[in-house]
Image (tube, grey):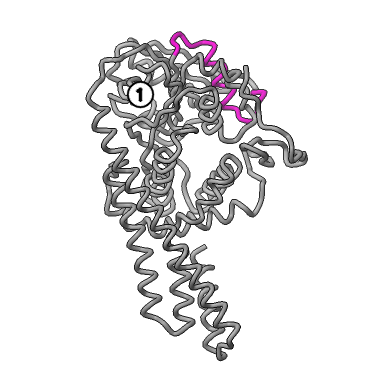
Amino acid sequence: MAFVFSISAASFLSIFQLQDLGPSAVAILHLLLGVALLGLMASTVFTLLAISATIRFRLNRNHASSGSDFLPPLTLFKPVHGDEPGLEAHLESFFRQDYPTYEILFCARSEHDPGILTARRVAARYPHIPVRFLSTGEPQYINAKVASLEVMEAAATHDIFVISDSDVHVVPDYLRAIAQPFRSDKVGALTCLYRGEARPGLWGQLEAVGMSIEMTAGVLVANMLEGMQFLLGPTMAVRRKCVRAIGGFGVFGNYCADDFMLGKLVAEKGYTCVLSDHVINHVIVSEGFVDTQKHQIRWMRSTRFSRPKGHFGTSLTFSMPFGILGLLIALALHLPTLGLILFGYAVAVRMLLALVVGAFAVRERILLRTILLYPLRDFLGFCYWAASYSSDLILWRGREFRLAKDGLMVPATETVGEEEPAISAGA
């Protein structure tokens, strides 16, 4: 992608080196320069909002950490599918919780799933933790995870569910932090920020940086401006009564973003969704260029349908595309100093955002690497954003689906009418 961009940039500049600029061309270039300046201004405003939201989050985090005496019994939901890299260590971190009463439910399509076998091996080392191993058979929903959630809800002993992905690694006080906000009966659901962790390799590290900075900044700003109206998949905690109030987990069985829909429907029922002060580790399991691009574009495309207005506005949160545009246009106008200033400013703004969010929100462990990589990640993020509008198709577990309102998935051969409503939030 970067190679194609560099070739396009070279071709762009060569046009103006081979011929004189006419009045119309100069006017167009000045218009594009104005677009670059406007984009840099907008991304600066977003950066200031993100810094303000980060400070607010950090202050709330320090305040919230003072009390930890509310310890209701919890049920952990762990859907698994296959034996992912590092799965055994990730699962074991949930058995090492400093928490008095909790159970863990594992669920997959088959009781012989490699993920279930790994979970059994780990559970054998912790016989004092109540554990059950469940299976769904062939799921009736497109989103097989939802079928697992239904089975686990029916088997759960306790009334607060903590749902987490298999590629999440947590520390011993994780459950204590999750439980605290449920002290208030108004709280119906909770979610956590997460820092991305990747093994050596540029593309995995870039994806991790996107999780830690780009995603976190967007969530913090959304929480500051409008409150949490969605959840994040790596950790979702919810009351049983809220699940029943929205009609059960099955109501979003054919939706791509089950985390978004769960938070949305719980909020629509009048309950508060909380962004926890606790930050978890989300381990990148995809490797290589192709896998990363597919995953990132699918995620962006899902967000486009889940939050269409917010997703469209995301274009103005990026800095690097406008810095690069400003550099190219300024060079074409024979203003190299201006071009370098605009490009350098874009880099500086992105590094500042990575510094503040990385240090004070998610507490990145290798902060310098994150700061240096984030300008490149910002440019790639814009490319993924643009690619999200290229199609409404996604590949989901080997099958192709078309996305509709709120991320509803239908087979690619079917169509969905413009007026078709989203799912009902009623029971």
- Residue range highlighted in magenta: 139-159
User: Where is residue 240 drawn, in percent x and y?
Assistant: 49, 14
Q: Which residue is drawn at 43% across and 48% down?
A: 207
> Is disc 1 surrounded by few (<14), some (14 to 19) or many (20+) residues within 10 Å?
many
Above or below, comparing residue 41 to residue 180 in the picture: below
Going by the numbered disc 1, the residue's amino acid type is Ile
Seen at 37% across and 15% down, the residue is 124
* Direction from residue 68 to residue 18 in the image, left or right: right
Q: Which residue is drawn at 48% across and 22% down?
A: 271
Nearest the viewer among 345 and 31 is: 31
In this figure, which residue is indicated by the disc labeled 1? 178
- Measured as percent of width and height from the top left, residue 18 is found at 55, 89
Is residue 402 shown above or below 334? above
Q: Which residue lies furthest to the left in this view?
A: 66
Residue 142 on the magenta segment: yes
Counting from the top left corner in percent of width and height, residue 266 is at 52, 24
Judging depth in this view, the residue of 260 and 26 nearest the camera is: 26
Residue 52 is situated, as x and y percent measured from the top left of the image, at 32, 46
Q: In which quarter of the image is the C terminus?
A: top right
Instruction: Let me know if residue 30 appears in the view.
Output: yes
* SS under mark 1: helix
